[in-house]
Image (cartoon, coloured by chain):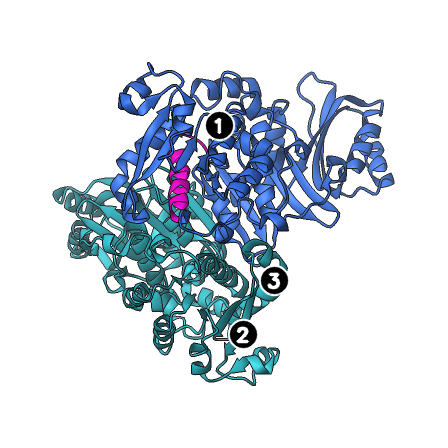
Chain colours: A cyan, B blue
Amino acid sequence: MSAVRVGLLGLGVVGAGTVSVLTRNAHEITRRAGRDIDIVKVLARDPRKARALAWPKERLTTDAGSVLDDPTIEVIVELMGGLEPAREYVLRAIRAGKHVVTANKALIAIHGNEIFAAARESGVVVAFEAAVAGGIPVIKTLREGLAGNRIRGVAGIINGTSNYILTAMRERGVEFDAALREAQALGYAEADPHFDIDGIDAAHKLTILASIAFGIPLKFDQVSVEGIRTLESADIVYADELGYRVKHLGIARRMARGIELRVHPVLIPHRRLIANVDGVMNAVLVHADAVGSILLHGPGAGAEPTASAVVADIIDVVRTLTTDPQWRVPHLAFQPDALSDGPILGMADVESAYYLRCEALDRSGVLADITRILADLEISIEAILQKAPAPGADHVPVILLIHKVREAKVDQAIARITGLAAITGPIRKLRVETFD
Amino acid sequence: MSAVRVGLLGLGVVGAGTVSVLTRNAHEITRRAGRDIDIVKVLARDPRKARALAWPKERLTTDAGSVLDDPTIEVIVELMGGLEPAREYVLRAIRAGKHVVTANKALIAIHGNEIFAAARESGVVVAFEAAVAGGIPVIKTLREGLAGNRIRGVAGIINGTSNYILTAMRERGVEFDAALREAQALGYAEADPHFDIDGIDAAHKLTILASIAFGIPLKFDQVSVEGIRTLESADIVYADELGYRVKHLGIARRMARGIELRVHPVLIPHRRLIANVDGVMNAVLVHADAVGSILLHGPGAGAEPTASAVVADIIDVVRTLTTDPQWRVPHLAFQPDALSDGPILGMADVESAYYLRCEALDRSGVLADITRILADLEISIEAILQKAPAPGADHVPVILLIHKVREAKVDQAIARITGLAAITGPIRKLRVETFD
């Protein structure tokens, strides 16, 4: 049986990692796949870079067309990242009847509906396991391993940079800015960390997870997104005292009135396994009706873990080369004609428990005023914590844990509490997830 | 497209759970699979039982032949458990050209080599995700999700009963017998708990995991097996003091001299996620060269979680109905002709760190004698803990943590230490895994 001929777009960190895994494990992979996998052509932006120089010259090109138009290439692996020209190249490959493997979460989250429609028309597979949670096979688990379930929700630590920063803030008591600089020095955060720390990257991944969990089209622009930039270490400390860890989660949940799609920091009881996922690790928790809860934990980024997912996808594609397209695993887990659609809930309609922190002047009656406001709005309090004032300070932190309620109501309460004369400064609001 | 016709053998807890999931989620499943799944005949041992009575009479039978010989049935789901007649029925179904889905770990671990050879000959699929770790898709993860990796090792909490008992012993300080009775009262342990508490069930599952991780034939009879029956709560308490949890693990590891296949209690540092898997939950940790470490956590037993895996397998089988057998995922992850074989290491050849506890007369010189014996054998000590004697007792517990060494050497040391005049009673030996 002849080798499968693969064209690789992009020889950056993940591209080089993929080449390295395919080369090192060639024997093991062929023992599994029953066929050799041969990277016959690589598109590299800069052929003078070390990674490119290590690659046979006759298999290296700076001309995308010479990869995309090569009729002997059956599979295109897109590891360039970014929206353009990745989108153009992927669509061109699809229209030429080639299967595509990609690690590009932004591309799938934003242009996935168009890409999968084109793939369906051409009868090819677009595989994207590496786009979510790096080396953790979460796409396969949701799409195939839990295919008998009605999936209720997915919650994941799906951005390693944010999780590294939150871990550093808790373990070493540093503020956000110092933790970010530390992450940048270690190569865990980019020079421009916007996508990671403002939740964009997590929103891309959550968009994909939600689609395959619920059988809905990709709806990136409807995800409610908050990052971790404004988090203060004080809240991480208070949360810890109350038995919670602060994590940045992507949450997709099927509710009676619609689907929640949201990315933001969350307090999680420290007894939960997912609360103990630290550093750059990722973890995805799936709630489904038959299986109950499943947690998948592992490295969410890095050259080799991402390559692990890319290579698994290539092997999957090789296996489906002879399969009638109708019997392949559908791109978004559900048959394209069976995708459903329904409302996505805005944050005002989300129900959650909450952690609130206000700074109040140290005078009597403040707690009475606050609890009166909450009672008037029928918001139920789980706990109130009034800390001692810092030496010399005239105000004290008041921390409230609030039972599950619609967020619109909490925002109303916050507006009213902010209006109290004794309250100084803005009120901090963090959502709480117990996963009970 | 007509429905896939399925015959079900066994209407016990898992059989009834599978019927219930297939019925409840019929719409969701068809949206994914693109085809209805119809259980057209059920073999029930006792048709007067409530589960059977709830099932349409014309689809119920006590005659295996009327299911196995029905030419319209494409898939047989075996959920009877036990070796015979399950083996006979499965082989008969395979020879009749039917695909098989089974949750039967004993059957696969002991007769899998024969069954997969027969399946290969008939060009059918035998799917067995439910045989290991219940609802956790660990077979799919190893076989497909990590297919690009060279897998170094697998370690799992794969028996919920044992994990429940160990959790109860630690959390409530009870001894093994009381914890077992508690598990039995709650339905987590059977009246005859032998398979669970003596490690047989875990050994079945480990056998399967090792085969698909390393591409070796199933070798159940070469697994080294120890259960939890002789564990004392004292050791769980001392382990806790030292920062460890005691867990019952199945471990399969690829070493230079051969493969380790072992099931026994293990001390794990409590900072490790897998050390915090409590109650009846299961978890499997996979170490592989590209991805690093992946942990999968979830319910390892129960009607619906097991049914989740069974139904996922049925859907997978439906998808491969039109696939050339050569391109299906191989039963044991590697192509049948590419299975390798090599020595399985006995416990004497295993390298591990150890926890030893001896009871010594409270007199000077005992520690000097013990450390001298260890030094003579070039065994390196990580820590020694000498507890105060219990009130009125004339002997004290001495606890040793020993660095990694071949087990044969530790056993030599234990024999010599046991021979010391000051040592009273047998020495407790537990292995330590740090997963560093």
Q: Chain of mark 1?
A: B
Q: Which residue is mark 1?
A: B89
Residue B152 visible within the image: yes
Judge by depth and name the residue closer to the eye, B244 or A101.
A101
Amino acid of disc 2: Val
Judge by depth and name the residue closer to the eye, B404 or A425.
B404
Residue at 34%, 28% in the rendered image: B41
Judge by depth and name the residue closer to the eye, B17 or A320.
A320
Q: Are marks 1 and 2 on the same chain?
A: no
Give the tally of numbered discs.
3
Residue at 58%, 58% in the rendered image: A29
Magenta segment's dominant SS is: helix
Q: Which residues are magenta?
A: B300-319
Judge by depth and name the residue closer to the eye, B292 or A66.
A66
Dividing the picture into quadrants, the one containing residue A332 is bottom left
Q: Which residue is mark 2?
A: A40
Q: Chain of mark 2?
A: A
Residue at 33%, 36% in the rendered image: B5
Would residue A33 be counted in the magenta stretch? no
The dot on residue A26 is 3
**Against B213, is A178 above or below?**
below
